Amino acid sequence: QVRLMETGGGSVQTGGSLKLSCIATGYGFGGCRMAWYRQAPGKERAWVGSRDLSGTTTYADSVKGRFTISRDNLRNTLYLQMDSLKTDDTAVYYCAACGPPGSYAHWGQGTQVTVSS
């Protein structure tokens, strides 16, 4: 059974940093594209960034230069390093795996990130 579990959310002030982790179990971790999404209150879920099998990472314009995606295949973990956080980054963050962009087969339960001024 495939399972994704996000950790690392919390509350931080503007300009601060957080690092989210997504631990994957139940499938060949190295064989799937993975991504981060977020859903802010009252808004639809939005793509944050992704890492494909070649290691190429891409990011939404709103987070480019501030967020970094990395993965540790030995630990079956995907990371999202978030720096220079803004109040607009407040959202529930989800990791997703396995599938074409926008159609991932597996999702985590989400972790809350709250940025306050």
Image: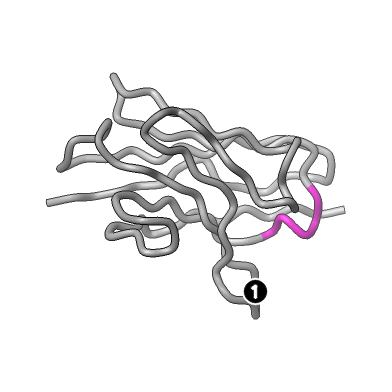
Q: Write down the residue under mark 1.
A: 41
Q: Residue at 29% across / 50% down in the picture?
A: 98
Q: Residue at 81% across / 50% down in the picture?
A: 86
Whether the magenta-drawn stretch holds residue 49 is answered as no
Up/down of 97 relative to 31, above or below = below
Q: Please, which residue is most extreme toward the left here?
A: 1
Q: Please, which residue is most extreme toward the bottom here?
A: 42
Residue nearest the observer in this picture, 45 or 6? 45
Q: Residue at 38% across / 53% down in the picture?
A: 96
Query: How is the protein colored in the picture?
Result: one colour
Residue nearest the observer in this picture, 20 or 53? 53
Question: At numbered mark 1, what does the secondary structure look like: helix, strand or loop?
Answer: loop
Count the marks.
1
Q: Which contiguous range is marked in magenta?
A: 86-90
Q: Is residue 77 left or right of residue 113?
A: left
Relative image position of residue 24 (x, y in whole percent): 28, 40
Q: Residue at 83% across / 46% down in the picture?
A: 14
Q: Quadrant of residue 42?
A: bottom right
Up/down of 8 relative to 48, above or below = above
Q: Please, which residue is most extreme toward the top here?
A: 74
Q: Is residue 61 left or right of residue 20?
A: right
Please tell me whether the stretch drawn in magenta is mainly helix, strand or loop. Answer: helix
Relative image position of residue 32 (x, y in whole percent): 29, 41
Q: Is residue 13 left or right of residue 91?
A: right
Whether the magenta-drawn stretch holds residue 87 is answered as yes
**Tag 1: Cα neighbours inside 10 Å, few (<14), some, or many (≥20)?**
few
Relative image position of residue 12 (x, y in whole percent): 73, 44
Q: Name which residue type carries label 1.
A: Pro
Relative image position of residue 56 (x, y in whole percent): 50, 32
